[in-house]
Image (spheres, rainbow, N blue to C red):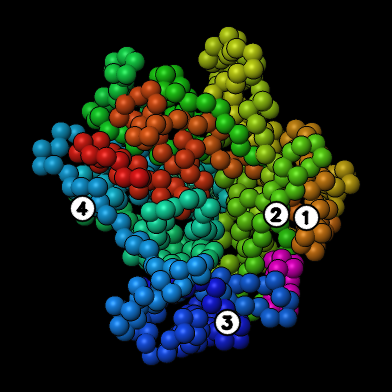
Amino acid sequence: MIRLAELKLPLSALEYHPENHTEFLPEARLRALAAERLGIAADAIAQLHVFKRSFDARQKTELLAVYIVDIRLVDESQEAALLAQFDDHSHVNPTPDMTWTPVGHAPADLKHRPVVVGFGPCGMFAALVLAQMGFKPIVLERGKTVRERTKDTWRLWRKRELTPESNVQFGEGGAGTFSDGKLYSQIKDPRYLGRKVLTEFVTYGAPEEILYAAHPHIGTFKLVKLVEGIREEICRLGGEIRFESKVTDITIEGEGDARKVSALQVLNQATGDSYTLTTDQVVMALGHSARDTFTMFYERGVYMEAKPFSIGFRIEHPQSVIDQARWGKFAGHPFLGAADYKLVHHAKNGRAVYSFCMCPGGTVVAATSEPERVVTNGMSQYSRAERNANAGMVCAIEPSDYPQDAKSFAWAFDGKTFGVENQAPGSYHPLSGVVFQRQLESKAYLLGGRNYNAPGQLVGDFVAGNASADVGGVPPSYKPGITWGNLHHALPAFAIEAMREALPAFGKKIRGYDMHDAVLTGVETRTSSPVKIARGANFQSVNTRGLYPAGEGASYAGGILSAGVDGIKVGEAVAAAILGVEVPS
Ligand code: FAD
């Protein structure tokens, strides 16, 4: 097949049926464009398949849909000659092979079933590919099934009651279940593993459009359904998923190069019983909020380091302001949906401020997993029809910003200091990012009024340095509520200074971004993992064999798609280790 890029059509050529969100692909027009590009007759094309579709809004008078298509010629034997003819044309190439090939099949005498800890996108895809290769994995997930978890999560939003083991961060589907469900990523993916993730999602109920939209998303409700579908498939293939099963300890045998995992301690949270699970292959797909498990790993000597992440606030605008700035006269066109944005500003104090996890037409959510702490994040439904756009507005920080003193550690870890007193000057304690996150989230809880309200401020007041007393023209969406005041106290001075500078700069890129009544709520601290649990080329921990740190918690992914891709890679690596074959590269 031949892949053709940069085929452009005006928006007016496209047909959209808003009543059922159906987009009709303008196949005849695309065939004509493809034939013209290749200098062949349109009827020489037997098959045309859209690989990607994006929009180009750079010309304000004409908005263009831009396609990448794959075509098969009626006479397939002519394809090689045609490709040779366009050898130096960057928009004409052979269609790559995007099929996923299993590493092998599980042996009949498998000694221990591989264990996957965590059933977020990373653990889900590790378990799925292991199940597809016949390894019958056991999945341990500390939280509840997605339906039960939904009730617990809403209880915090509606009644201010947090369930520490079942919330936005923990439970079936992982952190992104109550999200915007954005399904794109900047990762390098030469093996098209992202395609496998999206294809599996479509198999279990995601709309087919996610396969070709440049910025696909599915929203919360559809995610819930497809998570259940993938769970059922893993079980059908002989896998097992144990919910409310928290890994509380790990047994490691041997020293030096012989150091390896031999068992896990598992707490059944429903019954309170604990048991030992013997295993020699463990995928640890914990997510960025498993602070107790990071701490346990640290105490057991698993190698990890502190790593940079970002802190800030959520910002909310009327979605119409963003649509107008992005799409101009085309704003509101049903084909385009609610517009997104991506912004970055390099502040004079050396800090970068950028938008994070933008949710068009969505809501700001309470995302803590720990009592008496406040964290914000964002989610939306597939329709993205809520009145506000929200995004994290965050400032990049480094381990040198984290507290290293014994007092802060003792406060954050209930009296434990982990030998921080002996920390060598200039080195950073692996858990110091966790200490910093806890400090900021506890402060936000106090500023919010100790009832899970988020502290909030209007953008105009924030820039001017005045406390806000009440809502303005943009009703905030965060539940359970907002306590108005001064967010200057919520983050370190360097972050506040950088954000105050960034807001007017962003207003120059998106008109209205720095409008007085836009709303800031905080704090946004779970932007990525505060630790890196390093692994080697075989995907195993650099100092503990049989332990596969994976996904966002170990700092090998950031977002649903990249976590799914990492899950596939790690599942393959486990299979390769058991079968004694090379890890695919
Ligand atoms: P997680 O999804 O965090 O899953 C880890 C799982 O491990 C959890 O279910 C947890 O309960 C379990 N676990 C932890 N410790 C233990 C233990 N000791 N024993 C047993 N189980 C354990 N990303 C996007 O790409 N698009 C978005 O639109 C998007 N929106 C988001 C909105 C919100 C509100 C949040 C919180 C995140 C959002 N993200 C989004 C980020 C995305 O969810 C994460 O990047 C992704 O889920 C990471 O996947 P993971 O599998 O590595 O970890």
Question: Which residue was labeled with disc 2?
Answer: 343
Question: Which residue was labeled with disc 4?
Answer: 237
Residue 523, placed above or below residue 508: above
**What residue do we see at 56% from left, 27% from top?**
306
Label 3: which secondary element: strand
Label 1: which secondary element: helix
Question: Which residue was labeled with disc 1?
Answer: 506
Question: Which circle's residue, 2 or 3, is located before the other in the chain?
Answer: 3
Label 4 crowd (10 A; few <14 / some 14-19 / many >=20)? some
Q: Does mark 1 have its CB less than 8 Å from ligand 1? A: no
- In percent of width and height, residue 146 lies at 40, 52
Specify the amino acid type for callout 4: Leu
In this rendering, the label closer to the viewer, 3 or 1 = 3
Give the alpha-carbon distance from disc 1 to disc 4, as whole Å: 50 Å
Which stretch is magenta?
319-331
Question: Which circle's residue, 1 or 2, is located before the other in the chain?
Answer: 2
